[in-house]
Image (spheres, grey):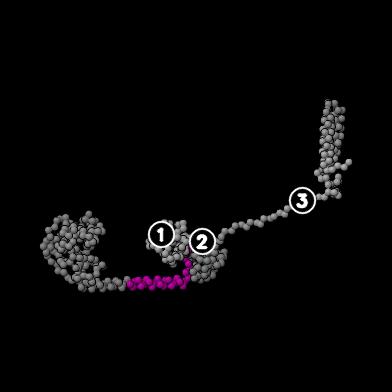
Amino acid sequence: MKLNGKGIAILAGTCIMALIALIIVGVSGAVTTTNDTDNVMSMNGSINEADNNISADMAAAEQILLRFKNPGETQSGNEESSSQSETVKETEPQTTEAPTEPETEAPSPYANKFMVNVTEYLNIRAEANQDSQVVGKLYPGSGGDILEQGAEWTKISSGSVEGYVANQYIVVGTEAEAKANEAGKLKVTVLTDSLRIRKTPSTESGIWELASEGEVFDGIGYDGDFIGIYYDGEIAFLSLDYVNVELVIKKAISIEEEQEQIRLAEEAKRAEEEERLRKEQEANEAMERAARESQYVETVKTSAYNISESDVYLLACLVMAEAGYEPYEGKLAVANVVLNRLSGGAYGSTMSDVIYARGQFSVAASGRLATVLSQGPNSESVRAAEEAISGVNNVPTYANFCALYVANYSRYNNYTIIGNQVFYN
């Protein structure tokens, strides 16, 4: 009778179960012991025999299980069955993921730039050594491009100068960028016509004025979609969509350029000094001419004024405030100008009206008169006020006076100079 694969499997399972049952029975009998020595020895022999039987039975069962698991194999396991072929499970091709390239940061705009790190200036030399010729200078806030970087010296380009600087006095990369942002200035150029210059960084803001294309402003920092600028002494804002913003840093100056700047500065200084001397000479000539043309005024004696003691004090204080450092004749003339106005009536009918008339005596508006009123006039000013009130008038036809340095003689009909003041009409 020929068994198929299913039959073999059933038979093998039955055999294994029977074998296990026999083993259990044999072991149970073997382990039933007494205290007799003979029985112990008999038990040992039974156990050994049972061990041998178990080993043989396990080997046979193992062969059956092998054939059950691989029915196409022979008992020896070395020959292939003519009716059964081996199925090879093809291994799925393994796909190797492409290695992920590390993300790289965008290169810094200052990767090949430098800024100086000095308090006065840095020499640029023709060669990479301390004894080489100086071809230019870099002042604080200056920077440029790196051409070649060495261990101790770096070849740079800045402005019109190319040469070498010592590494210990410059910074590069992110440090250079930070220093540039600190020392540089924002140049804001308008790219469209009629751009609104706003009062605050908002499209709803009020407008200062309209900027034209090409106009340039100094920037003071960003605020959202706007950049702050200085406009007519005020802080204003422009939309970033319509401007170009450039960070401007100082550049190197060549020795030739520096010498030219020095020459121009000296020329400007000489020209300024010459202009000062010219104006001084003109002023002196004008003074001499004015002194020659100044009319002598004879002092006259008029009727005394009936003025209260408080008005005398007020007049003396005005004289002190206006002519405190002038000679006595100048003090007397100031007092008489006030009295001449009081007599004329054009500036008021009282001493207080005349002295405090709007736009007349500057000391009344500046607070100088109030100070003298609180401290009191000096004795010469009191004497001048009292003598003028008594009728002594050294400028009987004049109702105006001013300091010499503001005098405009062409506007005066007549005038006389006393000390550093001009009295005129």
Quadrant in the picture for residue 259: bottom left
Q: Position of residue 155 (x, y in %)?
A: 54, 67
Q: Is residue 309 left or right of residue 88?
A: left
The residue indicated by pointer 2 is 176
First in sequence, mark 2 or 1: give its number: 2
The answer to which of 7 and 50 lies nearer the viewer is 7
Q: CA separation, marks 1 and 3?
A: 78 Å
Q: Position of residue 317 (x, y in %)?
A: 20, 58
The range drawn in magenta is 246-275
The residue indicated by pointer 3 is 89
Secondary-structure class at tag 2: helix
Q: Is residue 321 left or right of residue 19?
A: left
Instruction: Give the vertical position of 251 relative to 80 (above or below).
Output: below
Residue 50 appears in the figure: yes
Does the segment drawn in magenta span residue 328? no
Q: Do the residues under discs 3 and 2 have CB atoms within 8 angstroms?
A: no
Q: Which mark is residue 163?
A: none
**Residue at screen point 52% across, 66% down:** 145
